[in-house]
Image (cartoon, rainbow, N blue to C red):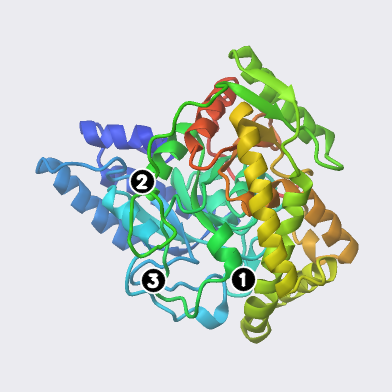
Amino acid sequence: MTAELWALEATTAASLIRLGAASSREIVSASLTRLEQVNPRINAVVRRMDQEALAAADEADRARAAGVSLGPLHGVPVTIKVNIDQAGHPTDGGVAAYRDIVAQEDNPVVANFRKAGAIIIGRTNTPCYSMRWFTANELHGATLNPWDAAMTCGGSSGGAGAAVAAGIGPIAHGNDIAGSVRYPAYCCGLVGMRPTYGRVASFNATAKGAASISSQLMAVQGPLTRSVRDNRLALTVMAQPDARDPRHVTPAPAPPPRRPRHAALVPEMGTTHPRIAAAVREAGRRLTAAGWTVEEISPPRLEEAAGLWPVIGMPDVTTGLLPLVEQNGDAAIRRSLDLWQRCWPGADAAACLAGLGRRAAILREWQIFLEDWPLVVMPVSCNLPYAVDEDLRDEETTARMLREQSPMLAVSVLGLPGLSVPVEDSAGWPAGVQLVAGRFREDMCYDAAEIIEAQRRPVQPIDPREAA
Protein backbone atom coordinates (compact mmCIF):
# COMPACT_ATOMS: atom_id res chain seq x y z
CA MET A 1 0.00 0.00 0.00
CA THR A 2 2.84 2.44 0.80
CA ALA A 3 3.94 2.57 -2.83
CA GLU A 4 0.49 3.93 -3.79
CA LEU A 5 -0.03 6.44 -0.99
CA TRP A 6 1.36 9.31 -3.07
CA ALA A 7 -1.42 8.80 -5.64
CA LEU A 8 -4.29 9.22 -3.17
CA GLU A 9 -6.72 12.11 -3.35
CA ALA A 10 -6.49 14.50 -0.40
CA THR A 11 -9.94 13.54 0.89
CA THR A 12 -8.99 9.86 0.88
CA ALA A 13 -5.62 10.48 2.51
CA ALA A 14 -7.21 12.61 5.25
CA SER A 15 -9.77 9.88 5.93
CA LEU A 16 -7.13 7.16 6.19
CA ILE A 17 -5.10 9.26 8.61
CA ARG A 18 -8.16 10.07 10.69
CA LEU A 19 -9.09 6.37 10.89
CA GLY A 20 -5.54 5.28 11.66
CA ALA A 21 -5.35 3.17 8.48
CA ALA A 22 -2.28 5.14 7.41
CA SER A 23 -0.03 7.59 9.17
CA SER A 24 0.83 11.07 8.02
CA ARG A 25 4.49 10.04 8.03
CA GLU A 26 3.74 7.22 5.60
CA ILE A 27 1.79 9.45 3.23
CA VAL A 28 4.24 12.35 3.38
CA SER A 29 7.19 9.98 2.92
CA ALA A 30 5.49 8.45 -0.11
CA SER A 31 4.93 11.91 -1.60
CA LEU A 32 8.57 12.85 -1.01
CA THR A 33 9.66 9.62 -2.69
CA ARG A 34 7.46 10.44 -5.66
CA LEU A 35 8.96 13.94 -5.73
CA GLU A 36 12.43 12.41 -5.80
CA GLN A 37 11.43 10.17 -8.72
CA VAL A 38 9.67 12.63 -11.04
CA ASN A 39 10.68 16.16 -10.13
CA PRO A 40 14.11 15.99 -11.82
CA ARG A 41 12.23 15.44 -15.10
CA ILE A 42 9.74 18.34 -14.74
CA ASN A 43 11.24 20.82 -12.21
CA ALA A 44 7.87 21.60 -10.62
CA VAL A 45 9.08 21.87 -7.00
CA VAL A 46 12.05 24.23 -6.75
CA ARG A 47 12.44 24.23 -2.97
CA ARG A 48 12.14 20.93 -1.14
CA MET A 49 11.22 20.75 2.53
CA ASP A 50 11.82 17.09 3.36
CA GLN A 51 13.01 17.38 6.95
CA GLU A 52 10.55 20.10 7.86
CA ALA A 53 7.71 18.11 6.28
CA LEU A 54 8.62 14.84 7.99
CA ALA A 55 8.89 16.57 11.36
CA ALA A 56 5.44 18.10 10.84
CA ALA A 57 4.06 14.69 9.81
CA ASP A 58 5.42 13.10 12.99
CA GLU A 59 3.79 15.87 15.02
CA ALA A 60 0.52 15.25 13.17
CA ASP A 61 0.68 11.57 14.07
CA ARG A 62 1.36 12.38 17.70
CA ALA A 63 -1.62 14.73 17.74
CA ARG A 64 -3.91 12.05 16.38
CA ALA A 65 -2.63 9.52 18.92
CA ALA A 66 -3.30 12.03 21.70
CA GLY A 67 -6.90 12.46 20.59
CA VAL A 68 -6.50 16.08 19.52
CA SER A 69 -9.24 17.45 17.27
CA LEU A 70 -8.08 17.05 13.69
CA GLY A 71 -8.44 19.54 10.86
CA PRO A 72 -9.88 18.58 7.47
CA LEU A 73 -6.43 18.16 5.88
CA HIS A 74 -4.68 16.70 8.91
CA GLY A 75 -1.42 15.11 7.78
CA VAL A 76 -2.05 15.62 4.05
CA PRO A 77 0.83 16.87 1.82
CA VAL A 78 0.41 20.12 -0.14
CA THR A 79 2.66 22.49 -2.08
CA ILE A 80 2.92 26.30 -2.02
CA LYS A 81 3.92 28.60 -4.88
CA VAL A 82 7.17 30.55 -4.42
CA ASN A 83 5.48 33.95 -4.75
CA ILE A 84 3.68 33.98 -1.39
CA ASP A 85 5.15 34.20 2.09
CA GLN A 86 5.96 31.05 4.01
CA ALA A 87 7.84 31.65 7.23
CA GLY A 88 11.49 30.66 7.00
CA HIS A 89 11.57 30.43 3.21
CA PRO A 90 12.36 32.89 0.41
CA THR A 91 9.50 34.62 -1.38
CA ASP A 92 11.47 34.90 -4.59
CA GLY A 93 8.69 34.77 -7.18
CA GLY A 94 11.17 33.41 -9.69
CA VAL A 95 13.29 36.57 -9.46
CA ALA A 96 17.00 36.06 -8.81
CA ALA A 97 17.31 39.42 -7.03
CA TYR A 98 14.72 38.25 -4.44
CA ARG A 99 16.34 34.90 -3.60
CA ASP A 100 17.33 36.14 -0.12
CA ILE A 101 14.00 37.73 0.85
CA VAL A 102 13.02 35.28 3.58
CA ALA A 103 9.51 35.57 5.03
CA GLN A 104 9.14 35.96 8.78
CA GLU A 105 5.44 35.10 8.85
CA ASP A 106 3.00 33.01 6.83
CA ASN A 107 0.69 34.44 4.20
CA PRO A 108 -2.94 33.80 5.32
CA VAL A 109 -3.20 31.05 2.70
CA VAL A 110 -0.25 29.20 4.22
CA ALA A 111 -1.53 29.83 7.74
CA ASN A 112 -4.93 28.40 6.83
CA PHE A 113 -3.43 25.28 5.31
CA ARG A 114 -1.44 24.76 8.51
CA LYS A 115 -4.52 25.32 10.68
CA ALA A 116 -6.29 22.61 8.68
CA GLY A 117 -3.41 20.22 9.44
CA ALA A 118 -1.83 20.16 5.99
CA ILE A 119 1.87 19.33 5.63
CA ILE A 120 3.81 21.57 3.22
CA ILE A 121 6.32 19.44 1.32
CA GLY A 122 7.74 22.00 -1.11
CA ARG A 123 7.43 25.25 -3.02
CA THR A 124 6.55 25.34 -6.70
CA ASN A 125 7.93 27.26 -9.65
CA THR A 126 6.56 30.36 -11.37
CA PRO A 127 7.76 32.61 -14.19
CA CYS A 128 9.75 35.70 -13.24
CA TYR A 129 7.32 38.15 -11.62
CA SER A 130 4.52 35.60 -12.25
CA MET A 131 3.41 37.35 -15.42
CA ARG A 132 3.44 34.74 -18.18
CA TRP A 133 1.27 31.80 -19.24
CA PHE A 134 4.54 29.83 -19.31
CA THR A 135 6.69 28.79 -16.36
CA ALA A 136 10.42 29.40 -16.59
CA ASN A 137 12.90 31.79 -15.02
CA GLU A 138 16.65 32.25 -14.78
CA LEU A 139 16.66 31.52 -11.04
CA HIS A 140 15.00 28.10 -11.00
CA GLY A 141 14.85 27.08 -14.66
CA ALA A 142 11.89 25.83 -16.68
CA THR A 143 9.03 23.61 -15.52
CA LEU A 144 7.89 20.98 -18.02
CA ASN A 145 4.38 19.69 -18.58
CA PRO A 146 4.15 16.01 -17.52
CA TRP A 147 1.76 15.37 -20.44
CA ASP A 148 4.19 16.64 -23.08
CA ALA A 149 7.51 18.36 -22.44
CA ALA A 150 7.12 20.43 -25.63
CA MET A 151 3.83 21.93 -24.41
CA THR A 152 3.54 24.69 -21.81
CA CYS A 153 2.51 23.54 -18.34
CA GLY A 154 0.76 26.91 -18.09
CA GLY A 155 1.57 29.87 -15.95
CA SER A 156 2.02 31.43 -13.72
CA SER A 157 1.16 28.52 -11.39
CA GLY A 158 2.81 26.07 -13.77
CA GLY A 159 4.91 24.43 -11.08
CA ALA A 160 1.75 23.86 -9.06
CA GLY A 161 -0.05 22.27 -12.00
CA ALA A 162 2.86 20.07 -13.03
CA ALA A 163 3.35 18.88 -9.44
CA VAL A 164 -0.25 17.74 -8.97
CA ALA A 165 -0.44 16.18 -12.43
CA ALA A 166 2.69 14.13 -11.72
CA GLY A 167 1.55 13.03 -8.24
CA ILE A 168 3.67 15.35 -6.09
CA GLY A 169 0.94 15.99 -3.54
CA PRO A 170 -2.82 16.06 -4.19
CA ILE A 171 -3.29 19.81 -3.61
CA ALA A 172 -1.24 22.74 -4.86
CA HIS A 173 -1.67 26.39 -4.04
CA GLY A 174 -1.76 28.85 -6.94
CA ASN A 175 -2.80 32.42 -7.67
CA ASP A 176 -4.57 34.03 -10.59
CA ILE A 177 -4.81 37.54 -12.04
CA ALA A 178 -5.16 36.65 -15.73
CA GLY A 179 -5.62 32.89 -15.67
CA SER A 180 -2.67 31.74 -13.57
CA VAL A 181 -4.63 29.00 -11.79
CA ARG A 182 -7.10 28.11 -14.54
CA TYR A 183 -4.58 27.92 -17.37
CA PRO A 184 -2.09 25.55 -15.65
CA ALA A 185 -5.06 23.40 -14.62
CA TYR A 186 -6.21 23.40 -18.25
CA CYS A 187 -2.72 22.59 -19.59
CA CYS A 188 -2.12 19.84 -17.01
CA GLY A 189 -5.55 18.17 -17.11
CA LEU A 190 -6.56 19.28 -13.61
CA VAL A 191 -9.29 21.05 -11.66
CA GLY A 192 -8.33 24.66 -10.87
CA MET A 193 -10.45 27.26 -9.07
CA ARG A 194 -10.14 31.00 -9.44
CA PRO A 195 -12.47 32.06 -6.59
CA THR A 196 -14.42 35.28 -6.32
CA TYR A 197 -12.06 38.14 -5.50
CA GLY A 198 -12.18 38.62 -1.75
CA ARG A 199 -13.05 34.98 -1.03
CA VAL A 200 -9.50 33.94 0.02
CA ALA A 201 -7.47 36.24 2.23
CA SER A 202 -3.89 36.95 1.19
CA PHE A 203 -1.10 39.20 2.42
CA ASN A 204 2.65 39.12 1.87
CA ALA A 205 4.50 40.93 4.65
CA THR A 206 7.61 40.83 2.43
CA ALA A 207 5.91 42.94 -0.25
CA LYS A 208 6.94 46.58 -0.50
CA GLY A 209 4.69 49.44 -1.55
CA ALA A 210 0.94 49.67 -2.06
CA ALA A 211 -1.13 47.11 -3.91
CA SER A 212 -2.04 48.16 -7.46
CA ILE A 213 -5.62 48.69 -8.64
CA SER A 214 -5.52 45.64 -10.88
CA SER A 215 -4.15 43.49 -8.08
CA GLN A 216 -6.84 44.67 -5.67
CA LEU A 217 -9.58 43.89 -8.21
CA MET A 218 -8.28 40.80 -9.97
CA ALA A 219 -5.57 38.93 -8.03
CA VAL A 220 -6.85 35.88 -6.13
CA GLN A 221 -5.52 32.68 -4.53
CA GLY A 222 -6.89 29.27 -5.48
CA PRO A 223 -6.23 25.51 -5.45
CA LEU A 224 -5.25 23.02 -8.15
CA THR A 225 -6.23 19.37 -7.67
CA ARG A 226 -6.97 16.18 -9.58
CA SER A 227 -10.60 15.94 -8.42
CA VAL A 228 -13.52 18.27 -7.83
CA ARG A 229 -14.09 17.11 -4.26
CA ASP A 230 -10.46 17.80 -3.36
CA ASN A 231 -10.73 21.25 -4.89
CA ARG A 232 -13.90 22.04 -2.96
CA LEU A 233 -12.22 20.95 0.27
CA ALA A 234 -9.04 22.90 -0.48
CA LEU A 235 -10.96 26.10 -1.16
CA THR A 236 -12.89 25.74 2.10
CA VAL A 237 -9.58 25.45 3.94
CA MET A 238 -7.99 28.40 2.11
CA ALA A 239 -10.99 30.71 2.57
CA GLN A 240 -10.87 31.09 6.35
CA PRO A 241 -10.90 34.72 7.61
CA ASP A 242 -7.77 36.77 8.19
CA ALA A 243 -7.84 40.44 9.19
CA ARG A 244 -4.66 41.23 7.26
CA ASP A 245 -6.53 41.31 3.94
CA PRO A 246 -9.05 44.20 3.76
CA ARG A 247 -10.64 42.63 0.67
CA HIS A 248 -11.61 39.43 2.41
CA VAL A 249 -15.31 38.69 2.67
CA THR A 250 -17.05 35.89 4.56
CA PRO A 251 -20.25 35.61 2.50
CA ALA A 252 -23.65 34.83 3.95
CA PRO A 253 -25.40 31.70 2.64
CA ALA A 254 -26.56 32.42 -0.89
CA PRO A 255 -30.26 32.26 -1.78
CA PRO A 256 -31.25 29.63 -4.34
CA PRO A 257 -31.02 30.84 -7.94
CA ARG A 258 -34.22 32.04 -9.60
CA ARG A 259 -33.80 29.40 -12.27
CA PRO A 260 -31.72 26.57 -10.81
CA ARG A 261 -29.91 24.09 -13.05
CA HIS A 262 -29.83 26.43 -16.03
CA ALA A 263 -26.56 26.81 -17.93
CA ALA A 264 -25.53 29.17 -20.72
CA LEU A 265 -23.17 27.55 -23.21
CA VAL A 266 -20.48 29.61 -24.97
CA PRO A 267 -18.61 27.13 -27.19
CA GLU A 268 -16.69 29.77 -29.12
CA MET A 269 -15.21 33.21 -28.50
CA GLY A 270 -13.85 34.52 -31.77
CA THR A 271 -11.66 31.89 -33.43
CA THR A 272 -11.82 28.81 -31.22
CA HIS A 273 -10.12 25.48 -31.84
CA PRO A 274 -12.73 22.84 -32.78
CA ARG A 275 -11.56 20.51 -30.02
CA ILE A 276 -12.22 23.19 -27.41
CA ALA A 277 -15.66 24.04 -28.78
CA ALA A 278 -16.45 20.30 -28.78
CA ALA A 279 -15.39 20.01 -25.13
CA VAL A 280 -17.73 22.87 -24.17
CA ARG A 281 -20.63 21.25 -26.01
CA GLU A 282 -19.82 17.88 -24.44
CA ALA A 283 -19.93 19.47 -20.99
CA GLY A 284 -23.33 20.90 -21.95
CA ARG A 285 -24.56 17.45 -23.01
CA ARG A 286 -23.51 15.96 -19.67
CA LEU A 287 -25.38 18.66 -17.78
CA THR A 288 -28.43 18.14 -20.00
CA ALA A 289 -28.36 14.41 -19.29
CA ALA A 290 -28.39 15.26 -15.57
CA GLY A 291 -31.56 17.32 -15.94
CA TRP A 292 -30.12 20.79 -16.55
CA THR A 293 -31.54 23.22 -19.09
CA VAL A 294 -28.68 24.17 -21.37
CA GLU A 295 -28.76 26.75 -24.16
CA GLU A 296 -26.11 28.33 -26.36
CA ILE A 297 -26.36 31.95 -25.28
CA SER A 298 -23.59 34.44 -24.52
CA PRO A 299 -23.48 36.65 -21.42
CA PRO A 300 -23.61 40.39 -22.10
CA ARG A 301 -20.54 42.21 -23.42
CA LEU A 302 -18.25 39.22 -22.96
CA GLU A 303 -15.59 40.36 -25.42
CA GLU A 304 -15.75 43.90 -24.04
CA ALA A 305 -15.12 42.56 -20.54
CA ALA A 306 -12.02 40.73 -21.79
CA GLY A 307 -10.85 43.93 -23.50
CA LEU A 308 -10.92 45.75 -20.16
CA TRP A 309 -8.06 43.65 -18.77
CA PRO A 310 -5.35 45.69 -20.51
CA VAL A 311 -7.24 48.93 -19.91
CA ILE A 312 -7.25 48.33 -16.15
CA GLY A 313 -4.11 46.24 -15.83
CA MET A 314 -1.54 47.69 -18.21
CA PRO A 315 -1.22 51.11 -16.51
CA ASP A 316 -0.21 49.22 -13.36
CA VAL A 317 2.18 47.07 -15.39
CA THR A 318 3.71 50.14 -17.03
CA THR A 319 4.12 52.25 -13.92
CA GLY A 320 4.74 49.57 -11.29
CA LEU A 321 6.04 46.36 -12.81
CA LEU A 322 8.12 47.47 -15.78
CA PRO A 323 10.68 49.42 -13.70
CA LEU A 324 11.19 46.33 -11.55
CA VAL A 325 11.48 44.12 -14.62
CA GLU A 326 14.05 46.44 -16.14
CA GLN A 327 16.07 46.29 -12.92
CA ASN A 328 15.62 42.67 -11.88
CA GLY A 329 13.81 40.73 -14.59
CA ASP A 330 15.17 37.99 -16.79
CA ALA A 331 15.27 37.99 -20.58
CA ALA A 332 12.00 36.11 -21.00
CA ILE A 333 9.84 38.42 -18.89
CA ARG A 334 11.38 41.48 -20.55
CA ARG A 335 10.64 40.09 -24.00
CA SER A 336 7.14 38.95 -23.05
CA LEU A 337 6.07 42.26 -21.50
CA ASP A 338 7.60 44.21 -24.38
CA LEU A 339 5.35 42.26 -26.75
CA TRP A 340 2.36 42.83 -24.46
CA GLN A 341 2.99 46.56 -24.63
CA ARG A 342 3.15 46.51 -28.40
CA CYS A 343 -0.14 44.61 -28.60
CA TRP A 344 -1.90 46.57 -25.84
CA PRO A 345 -0.69 50.17 -26.27
CA GLY A 346 -2.18 53.43 -25.08
CA ALA A 347 -3.78 52.49 -21.74
CA ASP A 348 -3.30 55.55 -19.53
CA ALA A 349 -4.78 56.74 -16.24
CA ALA A 350 -7.80 58.37 -17.90
CA ALA A 351 -8.60 55.21 -19.88
CA CYS A 352 -8.18 53.12 -16.74
CA LEU A 353 -10.65 55.26 -14.78
CA ALA A 354 -13.16 55.08 -17.62
CA GLY A 355 -12.59 51.33 -17.81
CA LEU A 356 -13.41 50.91 -14.15
CA GLY A 357 -16.76 52.54 -14.80
CA ARG A 358 -17.41 50.23 -17.74
CA ARG A 359 -16.42 47.26 -15.61
CA ALA A 360 -19.11 48.10 -13.03
CA ALA A 361 -21.74 48.44 -15.78
CA ILE A 362 -20.81 45.11 -17.39
CA LEU A 363 -20.76 43.34 -14.03
CA ARG A 364 -24.24 44.69 -13.32
CA GLU A 365 -25.47 43.26 -16.61
CA TRP A 366 -23.80 39.94 -15.87
CA GLN A 367 -25.42 39.73 -12.44
CA ILE A 368 -28.84 40.24 -14.05
CA PHE A 369 -28.01 37.62 -16.69
CA LEU A 370 -26.89 35.16 -13.99
CA GLU A 371 -30.31 35.40 -12.36
CA ASP A 372 -31.68 33.38 -15.28
CA TRP A 373 -28.49 31.56 -16.32
CA PRO A 374 -26.66 30.94 -13.02
CA LEU A 375 -23.88 28.93 -14.69
CA VAL A 376 -21.86 29.74 -17.80
CA VAL A 377 -19.88 26.99 -19.56
CA MET A 378 -17.16 28.44 -21.77
CA PRO A 379 -13.58 27.85 -22.90
CA VAL A 380 -10.63 28.33 -20.59
CA SER A 381 -8.55 29.23 -23.63
CA CYS A 382 -9.67 29.35 -27.26
CA ASN A 383 -6.69 27.25 -28.35
CA LEU A 384 -4.86 24.11 -27.33
CA PRO A 385 -1.90 24.57 -24.96
CA TYR A 386 0.91 26.47 -26.62
CA ALA A 387 4.37 25.27 -27.47
CA VAL A 388 6.98 26.16 -24.85
CA ASP A 389 7.96 29.86 -25.07
CA GLU A 390 5.57 30.57 -27.93
CA ASP A 391 4.83 33.95 -26.33
CA LEU A 392 8.40 35.10 -27.05
CA ARG A 393 8.19 34.63 -30.81
CA ASP A 394 6.87 37.91 -32.27
CA GLU A 395 4.17 40.58 -32.00
CA GLU A 396 1.72 38.81 -34.29
CA THR A 397 1.89 35.61 -32.24
CA THR A 398 1.45 37.48 -28.96
CA ALA A 399 -1.56 39.39 -30.32
CA ARG A 400 -3.19 36.10 -31.34
CA MET A 401 -2.48 34.54 -27.96
CA LEU A 402 -3.95 37.50 -26.07
CA ARG A 403 -7.15 37.13 -28.11
CA GLU A 404 -7.25 33.39 -27.45
CA GLN A 405 -6.87 33.89 -23.69
CA SER A 406 -9.81 36.30 -23.55
CA PRO A 407 -12.16 33.82 -21.77
CA MET A 408 -9.89 33.95 -18.72
CA LEU A 409 -9.30 37.70 -18.94
CA ALA A 410 -13.03 38.49 -18.94
CA VAL A 411 -13.66 36.48 -15.78
CA SER A 412 -10.68 38.09 -14.04
CA VAL A 413 -11.96 41.57 -14.86
CA LEU A 414 -15.41 40.82 -13.44
CA GLY A 415 -14.06 39.18 -10.28
CA LEU A 416 -16.27 36.12 -10.71
CA PRO A 417 -15.39 32.53 -9.80
CA GLY A 418 -14.07 30.42 -12.67
CA LEU A 419 -13.36 26.71 -12.44
CA SER A 420 -11.22 24.87 -14.97
CA VAL A 421 -12.29 21.24 -15.21
CA PRO A 422 -11.17 18.51 -17.65
CA VAL A 423 -13.84 17.00 -19.87
CA GLU A 424 -12.15 14.54 -22.21
CA ASP A 425 -10.64 11.17 -21.53
CA SER A 426 -7.48 11.11 -23.59
CA ALA A 427 -4.24 9.21 -23.77
CA GLY A 428 -2.77 12.50 -24.89
CA TRP A 429 -3.92 15.75 -23.34
CA PRO A 430 -7.47 16.00 -21.85
CA ALA A 431 -9.21 19.21 -22.97
CA GLY A 432 -11.17 21.08 -20.33
CA VAL A 433 -13.70 23.88 -19.95
CA GLN A 434 -14.31 26.85 -17.66
CA LEU A 435 -17.39 27.03 -15.43
CA VAL A 436 -18.37 30.54 -14.30
CA ALA A 437 -21.00 31.53 -11.74
CA GLY A 438 -22.10 34.58 -9.75
CA ARG A 439 -20.06 36.16 -7.01
CA PHE A 440 -19.35 33.78 -4.13
CA ARG A 441 -21.18 30.94 -5.94
CA GLU A 442 -18.17 28.66 -6.20
CA ASP A 443 -20.51 25.95 -4.94
CA MET A 444 -22.48 26.10 -8.18
CA CYS A 445 -19.30 25.66 -10.22
CA TYR A 446 -18.39 22.64 -8.13
CA ASP A 447 -21.87 21.10 -8.35
CA ALA A 448 -21.81 21.28 -12.15
CA ALA A 449 -18.19 20.12 -12.31
CA GLU A 450 -19.06 16.99 -10.34
CA ILE A 451 -21.62 16.07 -12.99
CA ILE A 452 -19.08 16.63 -15.77
CA GLU A 453 -16.39 14.74 -13.86
CA ALA A 454 -18.66 11.76 -13.13
CA GLN A 455 -18.82 10.88 -16.83
CA ARG A 456 -15.07 10.55 -17.32
CA ARG A 457 -12.40 8.40 -15.72
CA PRO A 458 -10.85 9.81 -12.55
CA VAL A 459 -7.74 11.88 -13.16
CA GLN A 460 -4.72 9.84 -12.10
CA PRO A 461 -1.13 11.06 -11.64
CA ILE A 462 0.95 10.52 -14.74
CA ASP A 463 4.59 9.72 -15.26
CA PRO A 464 6.30 12.61 -17.10
CA ARG A 465 6.52 12.17 -20.85
CA GLU A 466 9.05 13.36 -23.35
CA ALA A 467 8.25 15.98 -25.99
CA ALA A 468 5.73 14.66 -28.50
Using the image, determine if residue 262 lies above or below residue 467: above
- For badge 2, the amino acid type reads Val
Q: Position of residue 284 (x, y in %)?
A: 68, 23
Determine which residue is flagged by label 2: 237
Determine which residue is flagged by label 1: 128
Tell me how far mark 1 sits from mark 2, CA to CA: 28 Å
Q: Position of residue 42 (x, y in %)?
A: 59, 55
Using the image, determine if residue 359 lies above or below residue 90: above
- For badge 3, the amino acid type reads His
Instruction: Identify the residue at horizontal 33%, vertical 61% (top origin).
Output: 243
Q: Position of residue 302 (x, y in %)?
A: 74, 44
Label 3 CA crowd tier, 10 Å (few <14, some 14–19, many 20+):
many
Tell me how far mark 3 sits from mark 2, CA to CA: 22 Å
Contact, mark 1 vs mark 3 (Cβ under 8 Å):
no
One can see residue 1 in this view:
no
Label 2 CA crowd tier, 10 Å (few <14, some 14–19, many 20+):
many
Using the image, determine if residue 176 lies above or below residue 47: above
Q: Secondary structure at mark 1?
A: helix
Q: Earlier in the sequence, mark 1 or mark 3?
A: 3
Name the foreground residue: 393 vs 255. 255
Determine which residue is flagged by label 3: 89
Look at the image and tell me in which quarter the C terminus lies. top right
Instruction: Identify the residue at horizontal 16%, vertical 41% (top origin).
Output: 69
Contact, mark 3 vs mark 2 (Cβ under 8 Å):
no
Name the foreground residue: 123 vs 432. 432
Instruction: Identify the residue at horizontal 61%, vertical 31% (top origin).
Output: 375
* Disc assigned to residue 85: none
Look at the image and tell me in which quarter the N terminus lies. top left
Name the foreground residue: 152 vs 317. 317
- For badge 1, the amino acid type reads Cys
